[in-house]
Image (cartoon, coloured by chain):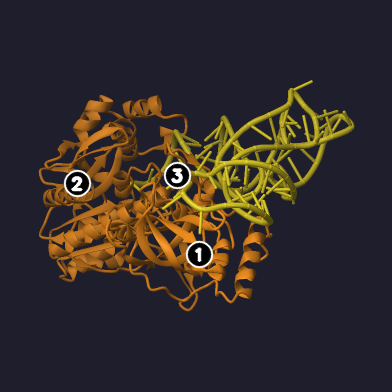
Amino acid sequence: MSEAPEHHLEAARREALAELRRRGVEPFAYRYDRTHSAADALAAYAPDGEESVRVAGRLVALRGHGKTMFAHLEDASGRIQLYFRRDELGDDRYEMVRLLHVGDLVGVDGKVFMTRTGEITVRAADVTLLAKAVRPLPIGKSDAEGRQHGGLVDHETRYRQRYADLAVHPEVREVFRLRARTVSYLRRFLDERGFLEVETPVLQPIYGGAMARPFTTHHLALDRQLYLRIATELYLKRCIVGGLERVYEIGKDFRNEGLDRSHNPEFTMLELYQAFADYEDMMALTEEMVEGVVRTLCGDARIERFGTALDFARPWRRATYRELVHRHAGLDLADTDDAALHAAVSAVSAGGTDPAGMSRPKLVDEVFKQYVEPALEQPTFVVDFPIELSPLAKPKRGDPTLAERFEFFVLGRELANAFSELNDPDDQRRRLEVQSAARAAGDQEAQVMDEDYVLALEYGLPPTGGIGLGIDRLVMLLAEQPSIRDVILFPQLRSEG
RNA sequence: GCGCCGCUAGCUCAAUUGGCAGAGCAACUGACUCUUAAUCAGUAGGUUCUAGGUUCGAUUCCUAGGCGGCGCACCA
């Protein structure tokens, strides 16, 4: 990119840059003493008397009128109009102003007044160039009716050059503020309840805690293959064995799967574990935590997203896996043979899914995904999953064919997964052996035996409840963004063609 | 991985049954001391995603590829 072609637009800016330097203006400053944000400066306006302010930000509009010039300056707080007059700035400084372009970063010292047309404006007494934009930013214009003209709409450019997307789209910056406030709320919520935030390895010799294919890497000094974690689960439960009692981690997991509107190869998960609790406690905690996030960030537990009115007020709907499959697929899992499951999957799959080689648990899971998930619009706990699909969860009291596990769904999408954590080391070993066998038989997403994890359980894991909550998906819901790429600052893309 | 759609000036978009590639904004020159899509006059700006093919001639038609969007599959 260092050999980027010089466009005529860029050439004009570079010529202005050179001219500024000839005039003794340093185009890239070290600092600026700002006294007011744009919003503060607007608020500082008083009809009687003119407040002095120093504002700083990016020029997003320039309107020259010969010996005067109007501009708009934008910073993190908003926009404010600037007014430059030759007779007030003097010839030299006014000539400098004429060398400015939209996109330049400037600081302006002046008094706040109101124009004849009623717009609060800073009348510039001095201008400082803070950074020359030698490349034009695609800043659009909006007309009196609010219609947008020009601007940056190409998705590819927006993702590849997120800095430009952010620079020209205040609403995109707002999505990431919402994301930060969401994470901040969750952290505060858990801290207040005695949870300890911990950091567990991203580089793991054995990966586990979820069904997924990992990224593989190599440590040179150890001459050892390592994996990027697909989950934090097994390390966090080791912390519970060690007596930390309540732990959580908010961090990236990495899964070597396809990319689409709701999947990025690295994504952010909150996992938390609480000793002496079971999945009923985790349901109560999830309800309280998520209702709190929604109320705090959206102002109400009832919100409308993607055209659907959603109500996050506790308690949420609860339904068992089995009754949902019965209701939406018309199949009673206790009394359905594999052939019927095959038929059900074949009936709805668009040809890509071939049920022929599927094990029964996979078939059941497929039926659930095809028939049940899309129907779960309102916040819903799906409880009591088949035990075969839940190798890290305790069997359900009274029915060992089921696991004490729930998933939390909104608008057809899984936001959280939780269980009463399996703490019997012998049972855990057996279940991981079944996974290993499936893996040997070709299931690339089956879990791997982790002897050290079983060893940890042998020392005694107290009864424990745990939750995994997908942060990106929660933010997608709150910010009403249909693509995960719109809630991840720098999403993964193919290399440029 | 599969299917559909898209890729033209810095940005947003036009255009040709296959016949010199255009507009608005941005830029440049000039006029303009309360404008706000400022206005007015003028100027400049293109590997039409890439590589082949068909053709007198391809931005347009065909083939392959790249990147992106959407859907499907996989997955969270």
Give the letter of the chain under mark 2: A
Residue at 11% across, 52% down: A281
Image location of residue A385, percent across then percent down? 22, 42
Residue at the spot 22% in from the left edge and 54% down from the top edge: A467
Q: Residues within 10 Å of mark 1 (few under 14, many from 20)?
A: few
Q: Percent position (x, y) of residue A92?
A: 56, 70
Tell which chain the image draws in orange: A
Counting residues from the start of the chain, the first of labels 3 and 2 encountered is 3
Read off the residue under disc 1.
A87
Asked if residue A437 can be seen in this view, the reply is yes
| Nearest to viewer (mark 2 / mark 1) | 1
The three-letter code of the residue at mark 2 reads Gly
Res. A236 image quadrant: bottom left
Tags 1 and 3 on a common chain:
yes
What letter labels the chain drawn in yellow?
B
Question: Residue lying furthest bottom in this view?
Answer: A221
Q: Is residue A142 left or right of residue A381?
A: right
Residue A40's spot in the image, x, y percent?
30, 61
Secondary structure under tag 3 reads loop
Q: Which mark is residue A260?
A: 3
Q: Callout 3, which amino acid?
A: Asp
Residue labelled with disc 2: A299
Q: Label 3 vs label 2: CA separation? A: 31 Å
Towards the viewer: A234 or A93: A93
Classify A273 as above or below A364.
Answer: below
